[in-house]
Image (cartoon, helix red, strand yellow):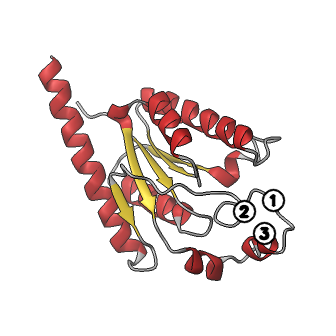
Amino acid sequence: MTTASTLWFTGLSGAGKSTLATATAKALRARGHACTVLDGDIMRQGLCQGLGFSPADRRENLRRIAEVAALMNQAGLTVLVATISPLHSDREMARHIIGAAHWVSVYVSTALSVCEQRDAKGLYLRARRGEISDFTGVSAPYEVPSQEQLQIDTAQLTTEQAVHNVLSTLHSHMSNSSKQEKNRL
């Protein structure tokens, strides 16, 4: 028996979370695994529409995403969540909702300077000018994960190398989950 998992990609805007989650989902589908991507930007256009970027709104945004991921895991889907999720307490809340047995934390640790160079929308520049408040990495904090299961710097690895690392971590997680499940039976 294998356990559907949620891979929670966290990191700064422009770190490569969405790119990596999408590429990993493509690789999983090619191997016959049912999966889906919950991208933070896309979730804010629908289910999380109307939420701002205050700490309370960010927490509610992540709670909703975690609830959806948990439901999808229960249905047998592997879920790849790509969201900044800047605070440790909010990531822990999401982990609690999803369940530790299903949770795989991926910290996309790309440096702020690289993220700013990649910023096609000019969000970092606008945040530095004071035009955007509560912008993670500039005017709002990002708490570096201390218990991630995988750390990836997308400036140091190709997408293919990063996907390989994610798949290896997921395989290890699923193997451990299966062993624990067998021990309970």
Q: Residue furthest top?
A: 185
Residue at horizontal 69 percent and vertical 54 percent from the top: 41
Q: Secondary structure at mark 3?
A: helix
Q: Is residue 18 left or right of residue 132?
A: left
Which quarter of the image is occupied by the C terminus? Answer: top left
Q: Which mark is residue 127?
A: 3
Q: CA distance from mark 2 to mark 1?
A: 6 Å
Front label number (2 vs 3): 2
Q: Type of residue at label 2?
A: Ser
Task: State the CA–CA distance, disc 3 to disc 1.
Answer: 6 Å
Taking the spot 56% from the left edge, 40% from the top edge, the residue there is 90
Marks 3,1: beta carbons within 8 A: no
Q: Position of residue 105 (x, y in %)?
A: 40, 49
Secondary structure beneath label 2: loop
- Does the residue at mark 2 contact the one at mark 1 (Cβ under 8 Å)? yes
**Which of the 4 image quarters holds residue 99?**
top left
Placement of 134 over or under 92, stated as above or below:
below
Residue 4 in view in this figure: no
> Residue tagged by mark 2?
139
**Residue at the image point whose x is 78% and y is 41% from the top:** 51
* Crowdedness near tag 1: few (<14), some (14–19) or many (≥20) residues, C-alpha within 10 Å: some
Q: Is residue 22 above or below residue 38?
A: below
Report crowding for label 3: few under 14, some 14 to 19, many 20 or more residues within 10 A (C-alpha): some
Mark positioned earlier in the residue sequence (3 or 1): 3
Contact between marks 2 and 3 (CB within 8 A): the answer is yes
**2 in relation to 170, above or below:** above
Label 2 CA crowd tier, 10 Å (few <14, some 14–19, many 20+): some
3D distance between C-alphas at marks 2 and 3: 7 Å
Amino acid type at image mark 1: Ser
Residue that label 1 marks: 133
Where is residue 44? Give x, y as percent.
Answer: 73, 47
In the rendered image, the vertical position of residue 181 relative to residue 35, given as above or below: above
